[in-house]
Structure formats: structure tokens, C-alpha cells
């Protein structure tokens, strides 16, 4: 069964902050290893206590940031700019204590510039570029000198060239790793925005369809009323009333006209507030038994089987839209197979589920991939596919969702899922 649709929110800021936290952990590890290498193995004099104090501050900052993110910190432009600025300040402090601009690792400042360009808006990225440029200029003028013996070399490379090589490789690797991951977050955000725009377009489509249906229903009301009057008048004509064949046909016509009038009334009712018409307090078992029973009465006694597997029978608020949702799914199932439709009502945790299974050919993979989009139908007629489209969007507005798939032995399965708190009657 599909999980509930994710709430429409933009977590890209939080995701990007997590990337910065991960980058900071790597930076702390690399800086600690470099300090130990230079101080302990190469024996170069460094103010190691001050440098470890800066690393300790970064560790505390990262722990606090991780806790804040887990507790639901809202991450926006200011938070990301502040995090990048703190990283620049910490790196500037370490470079100040180890040679300033003469330290080959000074080019690590470029990482903050690139991350700012990717994560921040234009003016915030300009601020980050200005901050790092100012830090570089300051390090060129003021820094703790780093004395390197002239005879220190590693193979064919002297120590400064080796440091520059390591710095270049680190910058390239970190930029490749984190810019790629951050771009993936941004692409995910763009996909969410596109989905939200699609949902807005679908809801606008529903509104326009509702207006058209409402107008058509009003237009049909008058001729249907006229037909009803004419048929009733014909029923009082002796020649027609005394003919058994004609009398039976008039009766069938009367039933058909009343059915049409009922459909028109339902269209007018559904075109209004989706939860505001014909509200009734009932139980889940009673409502769905009545809805499926009325549908069975129109399609034949063997058209539907209904199984109630509720562990308890909650009281719910029902209306015409809820019934119409069920009927639309049943109509689709019947049209697909023309054989008995199996309906199962059950409760799973705090969810109420109605599963409809038919014996037809099942859903095409393309239909499943585009579930809930208009005009996605395998029936081969123009304008098809609107029934399931309306069901999906009506369920979404009610706080529920639709899960569709194919059974292993053939046939389609559609499950309507409502959180109980969206339907259950609360006497308070």
C-alpha cells in the first residue's frame, strides 16, 4: 500500500544545512589531521592550543546545528549565510595562526565562495565573496608567521608545493562532492515546485469542469421537467394506458427521466462546497453498506459483493460527495469488467480503507504512472479518464488519498484511504 502523500513543503534549506554540517565534519577531521602532521611529524612550531580551541568551537557548533535541524529548525537565507560566514571565520583564524596568506591551504576559502553562489541569492552570494576576499586581504597583512626550514622537502617537491597540491586536490574533491549533492537538492526542490504547479492546474481544471457541469445541469433541468410532465400526461391518456406494451414503455421512460433528474441534481449539488451538502452523522459500516447497496440496485443483484471487516464501527460525517467518490470508483470497475465488483471495508490503525477490485484487464503502467491526471484512460473514448481524476482530487481535498494497482491474478485494485480524524464525528 502506498504511503500518505508527502506534505507540500520545501525542505531544500534543511537539506542544504545538513550538507554544510557534513562538510564541516570533514573540514574538522582534515584540519585536525593536518595540524597533527605538521606539528608532531614535521616538527614545525604551531600555536596548537589556540588552533585546537578553534576546532573545539567548530565541533560544538556542529553538534548544536545537528540538534537544531533534528528539532525542526527552519533554515532560510539568513541561516545558511550565517553558517558559511562562521566557517570562513574559523578557517581565517586557523590560517592566521599558521602563516596567513602564505599558507597554501588559503585557497580553501574558495569553497565558501562557490557554496555561497550555489546556495544563496545573488546579493547574499556577493556578501560571501566580499567576506572571503576581505579575509584573504587581512591574512596577507596580519598573520602569525610560519617558519619553514629551507631543507625540508618531500621527494622532488618542497613542502610549500606539496601543500599547494594537497590544497588543490581538496578544493576540487570537496567542490565536486558537495556542489553535486546540493544541486541534487535544488533539482528535488524544483520537482516539488513543478508538482505543486501541476496540482494547482488540476484544481483549476476541476473548477472549470464544475462550472461547465453546473451550467449544463441548469440547462437540462427545464427539458427534463417538460419531459416528465409530458410522460405523466401520456399516462392518463386512455388509449396509451390501456395498451400494456405502451404502458410498460411509459413506465420505463418515467424511471429514466427521474434518473436523469436525480443525476442533474447530484451535479448541481457536487458543484458547490464539496463537504457542505446533505451532511449526515452515521457509522462507517452503515454509510458504505448503503452507498454500495444503492449502486447494486442500479446494476443488478450480482454486480457487487460487499465485505465489512471493520474491527470497530466509528461514527463518521457523510455527505453526497463521499458517496459520489465511491460510486465513481465502482462505475469505473464495472465498465472495465462487466462482472461482479468486490468491495472490502477495513480499518488499519487510524485509517479507514475501502478497496474495490474488478475482474478486468487491469491498469496500464502508463495509467498508474499518471494516476490522478485528466484524460488518462484505456477505454478508448475521447474525454475519458475524468472519473478517476475527479476521485483523486476529491480525496486529496478531503485529506485522503488513492492507491491503485493490479492484482496478481488479473484485475485492477483501487483503494480509497481516509485518515479517521478527517471523517470521524467528534461530539466536542
Image (cartoon, rainbow, N blue to C red):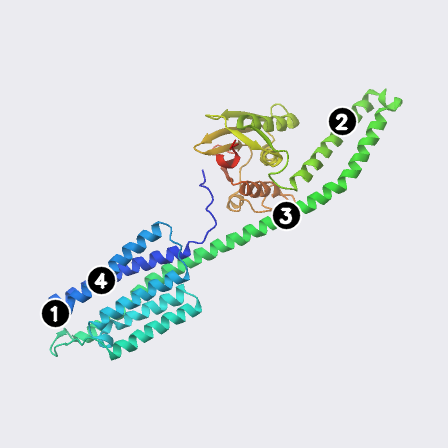
**Numbered disc total:** 4
Quote the CA–CA distance across marks 1 and 3. Answer: 74 Å
Q: Residue at x 56, y 51 (%)?
A: 200
Label whose residue precedes the other's in the sequence (3 or 4): 4
Q: Which mark is residue 252?
A: 2
Q: Which residue is mark 4?
A: 55
Label whose residue precedes the other's in the sequence (4 or 2): 4
Quote the CA–CA distance across marks 3 and 2. Answer: 35 Å
Quote the CA–CA distance across marks 4 and 2. Answer: 88 Å
Of circles 1 and 3, the one toward us is 3
Using a 10 Å C-alpha cutoff, classify the residue at mark 3 as few (fewer than 14 neighbours), some (14 to 19) or many (20 or more). some
Of the pair 318 and 261, the residue shown nearer to us: 318
Q: Which residue is mark 3?
A: 207
Q: Quadrant of residue 269?
A: top right
Using a 10 Å C-alpha cutoff, classify the residue at mark 4 as few (fewer than 14 neighbours), some (14 to 19) or many (20 or more). many
Which percent across, then down, holds residue 395?
A: 55, 40
Label whose residue precedes the other's in the sequence (3 or 2): 3
Q: Which residue is mark 1?
A: 42
Label whose residue precedes the other's in the sequence (2 or 1): 1
Amino acid at each position: 500500500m502506498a504511503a500518505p502523500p508527502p506534505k507540500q513543503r520545501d525542505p531544500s534549506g534543511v537539506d542544504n544545512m545538513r550538507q554544510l554540517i557534513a562538510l564541516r565534519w570533514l573540514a574538522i577531521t582534515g584540519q585536525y589531521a593536518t595540524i597533527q602532521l605538521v606539528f608532531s611529524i614535521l616538527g614545525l612550531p604551531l600555536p596548537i592550543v589556540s588552533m585546537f580551541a578553534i576546532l573545539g568551537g567548530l565541533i560544538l557548533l556542529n553538534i548544536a546545528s545537528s540538534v537544531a535541524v533534528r528539532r525542526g529548525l527552519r533554515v532560510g537565507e539568513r541561516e545558511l549565510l550565517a553558517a558559511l560566514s562562521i566557517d570562513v571565520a574559523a578557517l581565517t583564524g586557523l590560517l592566521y595562526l599558521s602563516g596567513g596568506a602564505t599558507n597554501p591551504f588559503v585557497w580553501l576559502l574558495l569553497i565558501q565562495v562557490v557554496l555561497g553562489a550555489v546556495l544563496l541569492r545573488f546579493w547574499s552570494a556577493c556578501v560571501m565573496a566580499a567576506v572571503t576576499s576581505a579575509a584573504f586581504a587581512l591574512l596577507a597583512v596580519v598573520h602569525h608567521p610560519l617558519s619553514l626550514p629551507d631543507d625540508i622537502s618531500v621527494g622532488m617537491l618542497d613542502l610549500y608545493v606539496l601543500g599547494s597540491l594537497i590544497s588543490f586536490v581538496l578544493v576540487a574533491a570537496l567542490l565536486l562532492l558537495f556542489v553535486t549533492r546540493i544541486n541534487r537538492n535544488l533539482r528535488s526542490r524544483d520537482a516539488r515546485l513543478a508538482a505543486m504547479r501541476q496540482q494547482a492546474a488540476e484544481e483549476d481544471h476541476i473548477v472549470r469542469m464544475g462550472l461547465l457541469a453546473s451550467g449544463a445541469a441548469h440547462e437540462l433541468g427545464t427539458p427534463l421537467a417538460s419531459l416528465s410532465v409530458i410522460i405523466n400526461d401520456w399516462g392518463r391518456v386512455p388509449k396509451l394506458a390501456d395498451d400494456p406494451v405502451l404502458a410498460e414503455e411509459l413506465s420505463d421512460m418515467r424511471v429514466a427521466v427521474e434518473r436523469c433528474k436525480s443525476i442533474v441534481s447530484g451535479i448541481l449539488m457536487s458543484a458547490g462546497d464539496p463537504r457542505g451538502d446533505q451532511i449526515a452523522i452515521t457509522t462507517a459500516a452503515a454509510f458504505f453498506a448503503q452507498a454500495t447497496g444503492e449502486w447494486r440496485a442500479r446494476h443488478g443483484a450480482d454486480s457487487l459483493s460487499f465485505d465489512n471487516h471493520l474491527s470497530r464501527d466509528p461514527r463518521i460525517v457523510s455527505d453526497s460527495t463521499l458517496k459520489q467518490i465511491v460510486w465513481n470508483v465502482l462505475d469505473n470497475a464495472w465498465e472495465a469488467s462487466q462482472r461482479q465488483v468486490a468491495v472490502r471495508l477495513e480499518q488499519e490503525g487510524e485509517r479507514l480503507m475501502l478497496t474495490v477490485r474488478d475482474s478486468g484487464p487491469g491498469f496500464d503502467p502508463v495509467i498508474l504512472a499518471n494516476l490522478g491526471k485528466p484524460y488518462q484512460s484505456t477505454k478508448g473514448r475521447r474525454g475519458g479518464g475524468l472519473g478517476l481524476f475527479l476521485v483523486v482530487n476529491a480525496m486529496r481535498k478531503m485529506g485522503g488519498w488513492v492507491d491503485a494497482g493490479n492484482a496478481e491474478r488479473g484485475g485492477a485494485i483501487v483503494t480509497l484511504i481516509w485518515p479517521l480524524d478527517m471523517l470521524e464525528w467528534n461530539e466536542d
